[in-house]
Image (cartoon, rainbow, N blue to C red):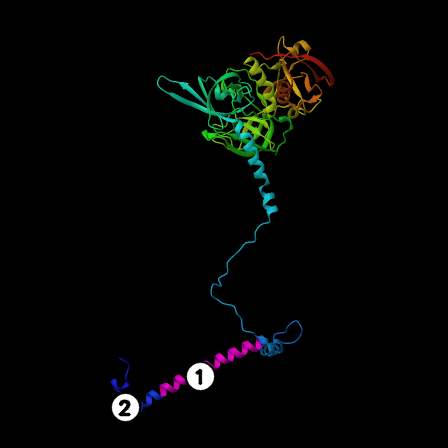
Amino acid sequence: MGWNFDQFDLEPYEPEPEKRKLTGLLIGVLVGAVSLLLIAALVFTTVSYVFLDDDEGGSILRRSENNNRNAVNADLRTSSFSFDGAAQVVTPTAIAPNVVADADAEYLLLTNVYERVSPSVVNIEVASRMIQSDIIDSSGSGFVLDGQGHIVTNAHVVRNANDILVTFFDGYVAEAEVVGLDDYSDLAVIRVPTDGPQLVPVILGDSNDLGVGQRVIAIDNPFGLDNSMTVGIVSGLGRSLPSAQLLDPTYDDYNNPSIIQIDAAVNPGNSGGPLLDSYGRVIGINTAIRTENGGFQGIAFAVPVNTMNRIVPQLIEDGEADYSWLGISALGSEGGLSTAALAEELDLPVRTGVMITEVFAESPAEIAGLRGGNQEVRVRGITILAGGDIIVAINGMLIRDIDELVAYLVENTSPGDTVVLTIVRDGQTFDVDVGLGSRPR
């Protein structure tokens, strides 16, 4: 029901006592005082603001009066704006197609290389024949070299293999046999008995054209993940690896020269896969990593394709590789014992070259009349033989150290060839013809 005043008892009015009147008076005085203070503060603030000088030397008071006049005379119109759904939505401006195309150009290049080369890359599984089952011992990668079924891979992938299974890009699986392998270069050739559409040969490049910083692409099978691509750059050139000694410590101390150092990710299963340039040409064969924990740490190595071009034809033809041989011993650049490092200390007439410490008996070098060291000198705690010939060039090409000399012999010569060595002896420069022999096995 509604409210009705008749339901309430109203007390008759009685005058307040004198005490209540005094209390009300005091409260009124306090309220008035506070009000006066607030008004004074407001006026002071307004006056202070109004009389601040502006840039034109006038006062904001006058400007405020003008603003008030303008506000009265403003042309105000009724707006049709509605607050319903007026929440602001961020709409980014679309990027111009040419900017997107430029940004994606590199990725389109990589995609194109992958589509063209991945059909040439194979997965290699090595199995040991057991009594009741076949067990996969290891796996690696390889690539199709020609239409006769030849596939290039690393020697350490198929070394001592009993059974080899090759899986092509389309899933076709074929058994393969070892045609030949070479531990010094860590290269091998296997062959599958097929001439079908699975054989898509690669295109070979030239590893001598490489430069540090150049883009490189690896397509391999890391951990059995078929046809995986990684990208990096050339981190260094002219490295050397003791490939044969890593496989068998009884091998003679001949390094694998001209190794390409890269930072593209290489993991177990990548061994034997192709290293490519931006045109999709093979410039190397992925072979090893440098690691402290067993995993990839940004340093990987590849055998240059120019070494492959010298070794693989021999493996296909003879099942093994034969290397040119001079028959000398020289100091390596490791440990600060290069000719450049010792030049000042030993008062050498040149700053680069191969300082011969020993000439082997009945070797091509001895037959040609080259001289080894004949003075024992103690350098940095090591005794070396100084005073021998210094090889500074081969066939007119300057040589900085023993690695470059071996690299030239591997990539450009064969046993039986004759080369011209430029040597420095007793401060004089001579040219010497040397008939190369075959490296002892």
Q: Residue at x 51, y 80 (%)?
A: 40
Query: Magenta residues?
Result: 22-48
- Identify the disc placed on residue 357: none
Q: Residue at x 45, y 80 (%)?
A: 34
Tell me the crowding category of disc 2: few under 14, some 14 to 19, or many 20 or more residues within 10 angstroms, Cα based.
few
| Predominant secondary structure, magenta span | helix
Q: Is residue 92 above or below residue 106?
A: below
**Closer-to-camera residue (342/13):** 13
For the image, the number of numbered tags is 2
In this figure, which residue is indicated by the disc labeled 2? 12
Q: Is residue 414 visible?
A: yes
In the rendered image, the quadrant that contains the C terminus is top right
The amino acid on which the numbered mark 1 sits, given as a three-letter code, is Gly
In the rendered image, the quadrant that contains the N terminus is bottom left
Q: Residue at x 50, y 58 (%)?
A: 89
Estimate the x, y position of residue 313 in percent, counting from the top left: 58, 17
Q: Is residue 2 above or below residue 285?
A: below
In this figure, which residue is indicated by the disc labeled 1? 32
Estimate the x, y position of residue 371 in percent, counting from the top left: 67, 13
Q: Is residue 283 above or below residue 66?
A: above
Q: Any magenta on residue 44?
A: yes
Q: Earlier in the sequence, mark 1 or mark 2?
A: 2
